[in-house]
Structures are given as structure tokens and as C-alpha cells.
Image (tube, rainbow, N blue to C red):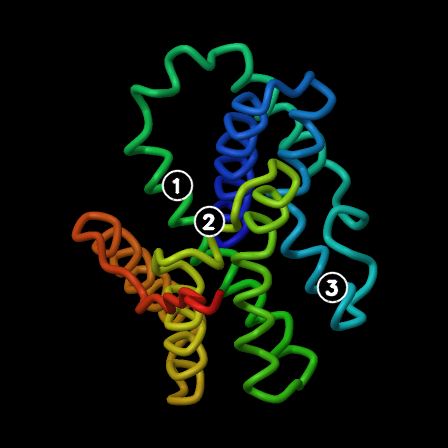
Amino acid sequence: MLLVLYVIAITAEAMTAALAAGRRDMDWVGVSIIACVTALGGGTLRDVVLGHYPVTWVRHPEYLWITAGAALLTALVAPIMRRLRSIFLWLDALGLVVFTVIGCQIASGMQLPITVVLISGMVTGCAGGMLRDILCNDIPLLLRKELYASVSVVTGALFLGAQHLGLNLNLSMIGSMAVGLAFRMLALHYNWQMPKFVYRDEWR
């Protein structure tokens, strides 16, 4: 089940990344690169930091073809994408929670401390989007006021808590991802935001 959700998530992330690349007037090679970086960058960064080799797309190069193909398909049908915005918001949120749980699972399997496990989940869930925003010259969503990284941390904490209580793995995954997905969509619907730090230097 998690594999199916993962493939759906990387496909959705690649498609949203392709739209971001299109807004920057990139050519098709650029669109494909941005899509692959967005969909697979978080897991790659996690694997490099944790020394978890080979990285995901080296073990499964078909993921590169899936993400690049999804990006190019998006470029072809871009005019109808605006009608599917709400679907992409759901899929992006699904990608966030799925990547988070996968990142937590990998770090847990390496017997790493709980803090590192949570960070591994957050990096897996958020770093791809951050790399996309940097390459597209935008302020990363992770650093803005939206509830994004916090959703990842909550999802990871719920997953680890469920595992600590001895719950079934599938139940732990489904429960934590369902709560994280609902949290993210409610945050978007009601415009929940993190507190902002605003500083204006008045000295002249």
C-alpha cells in the first residue's frame, strides 16, 4: 500500500513542480529536472545525510522515468491544470504525509534517536519542495507562514507514538497519515498560519 501511495505522491509532486517550472519559462529539460528534484530530492537528501545507500532513485531508476514522464505530460496538458487545482492540493498534502512516514521508517530502521527520526521524516517530506522553490527563485514554502513543516512533524510524531504503543504497522501508517492529511487541508481551508517574526530596523 505504501509503495502505491509513494508512486502517486512522486507523480503528483512532479506535476506540481512542472507547473512551477513552466511559470519560470523553462525548457522541457528544465521542467524534467525540476520535477525529479522535487519528487525525489527529499529522499535523496535524507539518504545522503544518514548514509543510507544506495539512494532511492539509484535502487529504482524507474522513479526517474515516472517523474520525468509526469512532468512532460503536465507540460502538454497545462491549459486544463488550473481546473484541477483542488485535486493537486490534496495530492501535495498526501505526498507530504507519505514522504514523512517513509522517512521516519527508514531512520527508525537504522536505530537512530527519535529526534533524528523526526527530522528524517521532515526532510523527506519537505526538502524536495524547498529545492524546487530555490531553483525557481521563490521563497521556500517551508520558510513561509503556512503550516507545512509542522504538519510533517505532527505526522511523524503520531506515527512514532503509534509504533511505541505497539499498534499494527499499517494501522500506524494509515492513522498518522490520515490525521496529517486532515491537518494540512484544514490549515489551507481556514488559513491557519504559524506566528510570524516581523522586525523593522528604524535606525538611520
Q: Is residue 78 left or right of residue 85?
A: right
For the point 36% across and 58% down, which residue is it?
Answer: 145
Q: Say what amino acid the circle numbered 2 marks.
A: Gly
- Locate residue 3, reporting x and y percent: 55, 50
Q: Could you say where residue 20 lies in the image, as x and y percent from the top left?
A: 52, 30
- CA gap, disc 2 and disc 1: 6 Å
* Residue type marked 3: Asp
Residue in view at x 62 percent, y 45 percent: 134
Front one among 114 and 204: 204
Q: What is the crowding at mark 3: few (fewer than 14 residues within 10 Å), some, or many (at least 20)?
A: many
How many numbered marks are there?
3
- The residue under the point 52% across, 23% down is 23
Label 2 SS: helix
Question: Dot 1 surroundings within 10 Å: few (below 14), some, or many (20 or more)?
Answer: many
What label does residue 95 carry, if any? 2
**Quarter assignment of residue 183:** bottom left
Residue in the foreground of this view, choosing between 177 and 166: 177
Kind of residue at badge 1: Leu
Which residue in the protein does label 1 denote?
A: 91
On the image, the x and y values in percent for residue 139 come to 52, 48
**Mark 3 — residue?**
47
| Observer-nearest of 146 and 127 | 146
